[in-house]
Amino acid sequence: MAKASKHTSDQRTSRIVGLIVMGFGSNQIIHFLSDQKNWKDEEDWSLSERQIRNYINKAQTYFREEANIDRDAQIGISLKRYQKIFTVAYAAGDYKAALAAQSKINDLFGLNSPVSVDLQNVNINVSPLEKPTDEEIAECDAEY
């Protein structure tokens, strides 16, 4: 069998990317691609398990490349999107949506996160509890 063209290889890899996104595992993909009735109106793949695994590896490489993002750029994009939503919602009088957008901005920058406290270097002087006197116990019993 002749080697697939780049176009065909890219199409096959794209199809496997879609299957992975839908939740298919490697064995499910192999089984799915082996069943030709799943490929109506498409070329006959007729691939061996090894070839399918090679396409799965190409798909995984694609995902790794997609995950290699510029975090600062993505934060900037998200911020601008949320600011746009806030502006449009506020101008339309949709304060609930504006508040939701502001909340997302706050989450993006961790403004709602609890403040961390370093308790390693804190001295707390706590005196041991003393046993209450009979009078104190009687007073409490009388109150309650």
Image (cartoon, rainbow, N blue to C red):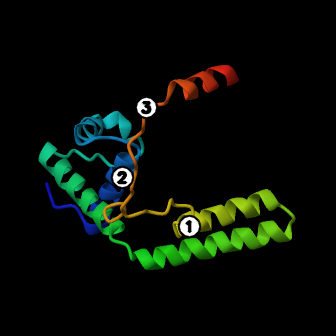
Question: Does 26 sit left or right of 121 as displayed?
Answer: left
SS class of the residue under badge 1? loop
Local crowd size for mark 1, using a 10 Å CA cut-off: few (<14), some (14–19), many (≥20): few
Q: Nearer the viewer, residue 129 or 108?
A: 129
Quickly name the residue at label 2.
15
> As rendered, which of 76 and 22 lies closer to the eye?
76
Question: Is residue 96 found left or right of 114 in the rendered image?
Answer: right
> Is residue 4 shown left or right of residue 85?
left
- Is 94 left, or right, of 136 in this rendering? right
Mark 3 = which residue? Answer: 131
Q: Provide the residue designation for mark 1.
A: 111
Give the label, 1 or 2, closer to the camera. Answer: 1
The answer for how far apart the CA atoms under marks 3 and 1 are is: 45 Å
Q: Mark 3 packing: few (<14 Cα in 10 Å), some, or many (20+)?
A: few
Amino acid under label 3?
Lys
Is residue 23 visible in the rendered image? The answer is yes
